[in-house]
Amino acid sequence: MDIATAVWGPRWGGWLVTAAQLIELLMTCILYTVLCGDLMEGSFPDAAIGANGWMTIACIILLSCAFLRNLQSVSFLSFWCTVAHFFINAIILGYCLLQIKNWHWSAAKFEIDIYSFPIALGVVVFSYTSQIFLPTLEGSMAKPDRFNTMLNWSHIAAAIFKALFAYVGFLTWGYETQEEITNNLPTQGFKATVNIILVIKALLSYPLPFFAAADTLEHALFRNKPETPFPSFRNPDGSHKPWGIVMKMGLVFSTLIMSIVIPHFTTLMGLIGNFTGTMLSFIWPCYFHMRLKWDTLEWWIISLNVFIICLGFIIGSVGIYYSTWELIRAFQGEDVHKVLPILAANITHLHKF
């Protein structure tokens, strides 16, 4: 935020970054809500309640997020999210390895579908845009001096594991690989058991982006006049005022409404990833770096920054075009192109850290 303000000025810098962060954070919250609905519907296909009903139930459970006061509570929930995550990974990878004799080696070939690949690339970019969490995390760490180490190793581990998980999953089910990969499990009872655990993981994952979104809104709008447009929704002891709780509950309900209204959320996620994701991951960091350090940078560092910016513009522009086109087709009720399964597997592993 401070860097954007220094580069673009106090009028536009902070607001542009805040808007991009909020879009990414709320889309992440929406995705977890959609994931709960899809998984529960896949687990109980004959139930009278559909995906929208399951999402509503999930939203009611998630209303408790409005009472979160600090990152310690979020960290506790994220810890159990990680435990559930490891448990699910062990089950799925174990099943995939047991099916090694039936792997679809012939399907694992390099080819690009121009319609689905830019969308899938946006999904991958979206799943790595951890910049939206960094201000909240860094400011709340007990040992901020270890922030860079945490950031480097978490991204390296995530990249290696996501690639291996997606590849093994694709070899097991080929082009039948579904976006929520647990829906590929063979028996209904087995699938339902794993899906319920994954729903628990999604519910435990929701508080982190929600807390970061609420924290971003608080710092931008709800500190105290005249510094921000509205008064603080916290009491002097740090607890929430009643109207602050109501506002946060409204934020939870807004994610539910978006989850129900928008069809083919994967396509929308690809659009957002190609827009705000490329801005936050490729274009803005390099531009800020050159703008602030131009006089001290060597020529090859400047060239590298320019290359990354150009790459970001190309990826973002192509992805925005095809994602928008597919989203329009979805709203019109037409069939959309299936996102490449080996990349869509990132949806199941969206948790940023």
Image: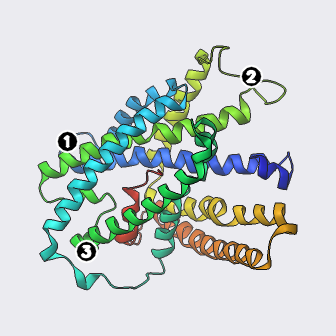
**Residue visible at 43% across and 45% down in the picture:** 260
Q: According to the image, label 3 marks what residue?
A: 171
Expressed as whole percent of the image width and height from the top left, the position of residue 230 reads 75, 26
- Up the image or down, 212 lies above or below 331; here it is above
Task: Mark 2 or mark 1: name the one nearer the start of the chain.
Answer: 1
Q: According to the image, label 1 marks what residue?
A: 47
Splitting the image into 4 quarters, where does residue 271 fall? bottom right
Q: According to the image, label 2 marks what residue?
A: 231
**Residue visible at 22% across and 70% down in the picture:** 173
Closest to the observer: 8 or 162?
162
Expressed as whole percent of the image width and height from the top left, the position of residue 18 reads 69, 46
| SS for callout 2 | loop
Gap in angstroms between the C-alphas marked 2 and 3: 55 Å
Disc 1 and disc 3 in contact, CB within 8 angstroms: no
- Up the image or down, 260 lies above or below 294; here it is above
**Residue visible at 48% across and 60% down in the picture:** 331
Task: Mark 2 or mark 3: name the one nearer the start of the chain.
Answer: 3
Task: Mark 1 or mark 3: name the one nearer the start of the chain.
Answer: 1
Q: Residues within 10 Å of mark 2 (few under 14, many from 20)?
A: some
In this rendering, the label closer to the viewer, 1 or 3:
3
Residue type indicated by callout 1: Ala
Gap in angstroms between the C-alphas marked 2 and 1: 46 Å
Gap in angstroms between the C-alphas marked 1 and 3: 32 Å
Residue type indicated by callout 2: Pro
In this rendering, the label closer to the viewer, 2 or 1:
2
Q: Is residue 36 left or right of residue 269?
A: left
Q: Residues within 10 Å of mark 3 (few under 14, many from 20)?
A: many
Splitting the image into 4 quarters, where does residue 105 fall? bottom left
Expressed as whole percent of the image width and height from the top left, the position of residue 43 reads 21, 48
Residue type indicated by callout 3: Leu
Q: Is residue 184 left or right of residue 328?
A: left
